[in-house]
Image (tube, grey):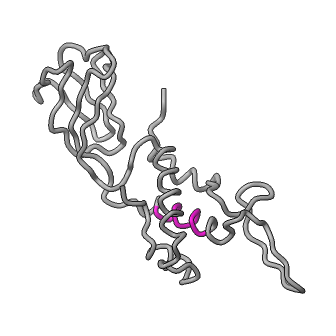
Amino acid sequence: MEPLASSSDLTAYTGGRISDSDPRVGTALDGVSTAIRRYCGWHVFPEVQETVLLDGPGGRYLTLPSKHVTGIYSILDTGLPVLPTTYRWSEDGSVRLSAGYWSDEYRAIEVTYSHGYDDVDDLRSVVLAIAARQLASPMGAVSEAAGGVTVKWSETTRGVSGGLGILDHEYALIDPYRIESI
């Protein structure tokens, strides 16, 4: 899956200090995007159509692994089709049966649906900030001195600069996209 930000985005974000031809850029953007997607519990961007196999909840409500559903194309419950007239769904990933109950078996419900955002400018900004910090000090040094010149990088954790550290204010931007676990 494509990263949440492009190499040209990073070059623009850093005012050209990090070139999009730098061989480390792709790995950094992929790593940061993967970390954010894992934290969120779903891919977030772009909008995709996919089929998932879910454990049956055993009640009237099924929760899809998404925070932005744009369409449901088919649902099978223990191999049998669930008619669209028998359920309602919400953009937040909730699917409610109007009658009956979902199976309570593991991996019993197959859903084909589309979901994801068309644009995530706020997440793109977080990816760029983290990738820029990571590439500015790839070895995690906090400062470097040569003669009378000292360069100090911002710390991501006490005594560490660079790396794939997500700061508290960045988590605040990511959290609205996160699927909360029960």
Across and down, in percent, residue 11 comes to: 50, 78
Image mark count: 0
Magenta stretch holds residue 101: no
Across and down, in percent, residue 21 comes to: 48, 79
Helix, strand or loop: magenta stretch: helix
Tell me which residue sits at (58%, 56%) in the image.
170
Relative to 109, say whether 90 is above or below.
Answer: below
Towards the viewer: 77 or 22 = 22
Across and down, in percent, residue 150 comes to: 83, 79
Magenta stretch holds residue 130: yes
Range of the magenta residues?
Answer: 124-132
Relative to 121, say whether 11 is above or below.
Answer: below
Residue 133 falls left or right of residue 12: right
Residue 159 falls left or right of residue 72: right
Towards the viewer: 62 or 50 = 50
Residue 10 falls left or right of residue 48: right
